[in-house]
Structures are given as C-alpha cells and as structure tokens.
Amino acid sequence: MNISNINFKPGLEGIPVTKSSICEIDGVQGKLLYRGYDIEELAQKSSFLETAFLLIWGELPTVNELRNFEAEVQMHRRLSFRVRDMMKCFPSSGHPMDALQSSAASLGLFYSRRVIDDPKYVYKAVIRLIAKIPTMVAAFQLIRKGQDPIQPRDDLSYSSNFLYMLTEKEQDPLAAKVFDKCLILHAEHSLNASTFSARVTASTLTDPYAVVASAVGTLAGPLHGGANEDVIAMLENINTPDNAASFLKEALLTKRKIMGFGHREYKVKDPRATILQTLAEELFERFGKDEMYEVAKKLEEEAIPILGAKGIYPNVDYYSGLVYRKLGIPRDLFTPIFAISRVAGWLAHWREQLGANRIFRPSQIYTGSACRNWKPLDQR
Ligand code: CMC
C-alpha cells in the first residue's frame, strides 16, 4: 500500500477510528444522547451514579443494581494510607491534574492483577475508579493547604460527599444537586482527545488504572479540559457588560477566539451550555448574583449575530466555570472535576474497546531523510 496516496487528515478530523454505541451527538439539532437517552432528560431525572452505570454497562440499572452500585462505590471511597502519604509528598505548588494523574496511576500498584477478561475484576476496577477519583481530588486540595485529607462520610450522597471532602462543610442540598447534574453533563462526549487516548491505551490490554491515568494526562491540556478556566479569566478581563461589545470587536479584529465558543461537533448552542446556564441561574437565585454572569450574557448576545452565522455558539465550557465558581470551587480544580465525571465515559470506552479489541497502530507518512551513512565524530 502506498501510504502517501492516502488522504492524510491532521488530527484525524472526520476519520472514524472505531464503532461505538455509547454516545451520539447531533451537532445540527443540538442533541446529545447517552446510550440513546437525551442528556436533557438524564440531567433532569437521573443521578451521576445512575448515568455512569448506564454508560458503562449499557442499560439503566434496576433498583437492586443501582442500590448495589451505590453501596459499592460508597464502600470504596477511602484511599489507602499509602496513597494519602504519597500525595503528601507531592509539591503543593503542583497542578491538581498532575496530582490526580499520578494518584490514579498509583492504583495500578495496589490492584495490579491484569485479568481484564475477568468480569469481577472489571466490575471492581470500575467501582474503585469512580469511588476514589473524587477522594483524590479533594485530598490534594486539603493537602496542598497543609491539612490532612478528611474521610468520606457514609451518610452523604456521592456529590454531597465530594463537596464535603473538598470544603470540609456539609453543603446546601441545592449545591450538591447542581454539582451532580454537572457530572452527568460532562460524563461522556464520544471520541474527544482524552477518550481516544483511553481507547488507545486500552487497546494494549494494560490495566484500567493506566487507561484512566493516560486519559487524565490528555484531558489536562489547555486545548481540551481547561477552557472553562479561560472563560472566567476572559469575563473578568471584560469586567462589565458595557465592555462586552468592544471586547468582541477587538477580539474578532485581532483574530482572537472567544473562549467557551465554538465546537467541532456542534453548529448550534451546545445543549449542555443551555442546561448549565439554567443551573447557574438556580444557584444565583439562591446564593446571590455573580456579576460575571451579566458579562457572559451580554457577550453571548453580542457574539451570536456575528459568530452564529459561522455555526459558532457557546459550548459546555461557557457557563460551567460560573457554576463551579458559585459552588466555591477553586479555578484550577475545574479540570479535575471534569475528570471525576468523564471517568464514566472513559470506562465505558475501555469496556467497549475490550469487547472488540484490535491494538491501535496507525501509519505515518515519513518525511525524514533517505538512508545515509554514519560519519565518525571528527568528520561531522
Ligand atoms: N471565537 C471566534 N472565532 C472562532 C471560535 C471562537 N471561539 N472558534 C472558532 N472560530 C473561528 C476560527 O477563527 C476559524 O475562523 P476562520 O475560518 O475565519 O479562520 C473558524 O471558526 C474555524 O475554527 P477552528 O479553530 O478551525 O475550529 P475547530 O472546529 O477546529 O475548533 C474549537 C473547535 C473548540 C477548538 C474552537 O472553536 C475553539 O478554540 N474555541 C475556543 C476554546 C474553547 O472554548 N474550547 C472548548 C471546547 S468544548 C470542550 C472540549 O471538547 O474539551
């Protein structure tokens, strides 16, 4: 086969690399379905753990299945003292995503049996990862402040417990409800970079902790997980709604992107952005306004007549940072929180990959020099 004749697409844009039944995106209608269920309905009626079960095992759980799943996740939320001690040695100035990647990878040291064709092992690995990743994120937050991590509380739900471990306070039920919905909204989005990374790693038949660690590392990059942090920085820079129009004009003139706008898959407003905007409003109503929300709305109003014509609308990151900010979550934890949620999607893809595995081994178009002779040092 003459590789150079193949239509080369940098970034594999538009090239299918797998078949998948996990998630469907309709970028024209603005629809996102997990296993055939509309994200809007899931965000309204489901919980994150139920949605994770659906994504990973393919069907909504029965009452018993959900009860067992929730109980097992609850049982496995604690971290071994060795993992906690290891995390205490991380530099407190380090990025929480690096701390999470290292901690997730370390689980492979504790549960290293690579029997990925044993359903019991697969189930336990799923439980451990979903249970322990939030504990790791919260633990690093306290450790870097010089405190000891606090233990999970068995009387709290998945999301309430995470907020409790992070802030050391039991939060208002509305905060936990909104946070849980955010986790549902971020749980899966087909073959984005981190999910592709998870599938490539899975295809080598390595253990699931390595699969998730590689996905966390991929999510950490600013072109993937970090745009909601940049949205907040942009809104703070604009400062007041009155500056939105001039900021937009200047950005477009100098070809700078509006953060939180645009998506490879969506040509209309991202359905998750619409839901997140409603969630943000619920929080503002209860806990007080955020001035930056007015800036965001004004910028959206100014941008849509111009960017909308090119199919560029708010994406999931446009309003999520404002929600997290109102929940009191520090900005550099936005991406680790994305990972808490997306682990469900990564694990669903891990299982699907193993179901019909072929190791990923793409080709390349070689552009280096032809065969040449080695020269001794004194002749170079
Ligand atoms: N503001 C202004 N113009 C934009 C924007 C934007 N946010 N996004 C795309 N464009 C323009 C871009 O300048 C280009 O115009 P032209 O053809 O005149 O040069 C055209 O639209 C195509 O842009 P692109 O970057 O080639 O489009 P893409 O599909 O490769 O990029 C994107 C998608 C999300 C990377 C991009 O829209 C972007 O950088 N947005 C800002 C960052 C952001 O919000 N990222 C979060 C993505 S959603 C979460 C995730 O999936 O991780």
Image (cartoon, rainbow, N blue to C red):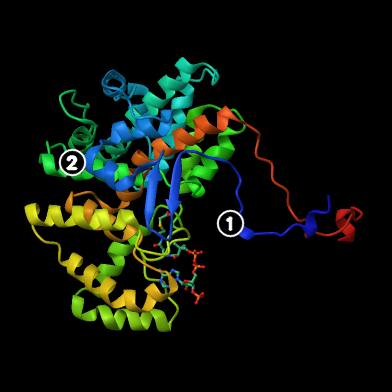
Secondary structure at badge 1 equals loop
Q: CA distance from mark 2 to mark 1?
A: 36 Å
Residue under the point 22% across and 27% down: 152
The image quadrant of residue 230 is bottom left
Residue 114 occupies which quadrant of the picture? top right
Q: Mark 2 sits on what residue?
A: 177
Q: Position of residue 160 (x, y in %)?
A: 18, 35
> Label 2 amino acid?
Lys
Residue at the spot x=49%, y=43% of the render? 195
Which disc, if any, is residue 14?
Answer: 1
In this rendering, is residue 140 above or below 155?
Answer: below
Question: In this orientation, does residue 92 appear?
Answer: no
Look at label 1 and name its amino acid: Gly
Q: Residue at x 41, y 71 (%)?
A: 257
Asked whether residue 262 is in view, the answer is yes
Q: Toward which corner of the image does residue 378 lie, by quadrant?
A: bottom right
Provide the secondary structure element on which disc 2 rests.
helix
28 vs 207: above or below = below
